[in-house]
Image (cartoon, rainbow, N blue to C red):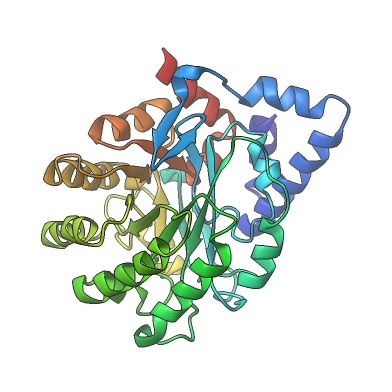
Amino acid sequence: MYKILKPLLFLIQPETAHKLTLSLFKIALFLPGGKWIAKKMYNTQDERLKRNLFGLEFKNPVGLAAGFDKDAKYINLMSHLGFGFIEIGTVTPKPQVGNPQPRLFRLKKDKALINRMGFNNEGLEATVERLKKARPEGLILGGNIGKNKVTPNEEAENDYKLCFEAMHPYVDYFVVNVSSPNTPGLRDLQDKEPLSKLLNKLQQLNRKKPNPKPILLKIAPDLTDSQLDDIVEIVENTGIAGLIATNTTISRAGLQESQESIEKIGNGGLSGQPLQERSTEVIRYLHQKSNGAFPIIAVGGIHSAESAKEKLEAGAALVQIYTGLIYEGPKLIKRINQSLLE
């Protein structure tokens, strides 16, 4: 079905195509037998796929990365595609419209996307109201949190704390996003001192809870080895649960699209197949440097069962997809899970 739809969807603006695809899938599910067909087409149920991590049981190791469902609108819908876990967000305390459109671009030759969305979301209050509703049994849900664009870095801690407190009863794990390239100055929070301070504050709040939740940090692929060494030290010193590696890159190296097209698009984070190698390098480096001391969730350039296994062999415990889903369709989830079983 997706193979038929994809050429048509790729004729329209990516953001419009995103909304249209979700609407069509919702309609398909409510047709007679729709949910049964989706289960047969996309789901792989096998005890051997289960993963126990952070004190949570994931029914399989393939998750939906943050950015696809920013406002927790599609949790139930996307659960029919066979994901083991879904991560919503990035959520900020106040609603924000994000950057002006167009802000999402396809690089078809590279099976990639460039986005400069800018944490567009409906805000914490609206998201929490949706999170209060029932969700599919056995589905692990992550909450990716960030700061508002108007919040100066010196006050960023308050934004993360607000999101953490409000979402704590409703998500299974948290992801601290300081690595998006589309909020001015955000990546400065990846520096050792401000990052340690932020994570320690969140951990203090977390430890006071009767049921502390795993806190993970999402990092950029553009960090140097010495910065990655700092990240390993920060994870160990703050006691957070692990890392998500990696976010989008600001690099444009090795792309097949013309230089003219790339320049016309302008700024933004690159995701998809061109990120595969660098993301795997970062995962392998972190895993070896830390002697596997903490779990890593892999994201970045996963477009096939082989690229997913590459990440797992490099040291990742779980994988997430987003851009691969756009180019390969929802059967990618089943292909990865079945390949792992084989």
On the rendered structure, is 85 left or right of 95? left
**Residue 265 % position (x, y):** 46, 66
**Residue 149 % position (x, y):** 48, 81
**Residue 87 % position (x, y):** 52, 50
On the rendered structure, is 171 left or right of 31? left
Q: Is residue 308 above or below residue 108?
A: above
Image quadrant holding the N terminus, namely: top right
| Residue drawn at the location 69% of the way across and 24% of the way down | 39
Front one among 105 and 172: 172
Q: Quadrant of residue 216?
A: bottom left
Q: Is residue 152 above or below residue 239?
A: below
| Residue drawn at the location 32% of the way across and 67% of the way down | 199
**Residue 170 % position (x, y):** 60, 55
Query: Taking the image as drawn, is residue 123 in sight?
Result: no
| Residue drawn at the location 29% of the way across and 46% of the way down | 279
| Residue drawn at the location 40% of the way across and 52% of the way down | 214
Q: Quadrant of residue 183?
A: bottom left
Image quadrant holding the C terminus, namely: top left
Front one among 72 and 196: 196
Residue farthest along the top direction in this orientation: 342
Q: Is residue 88 above or below residue 310?
A: below
Residue farthest along the right direction in this orientation: 32
On the rendered structure, is 204 left or right of 29? left
Query: Taking the image as drawn, is residue 124 in sight?
Result: yes
In this rendering, the count of numbered labels is: 0
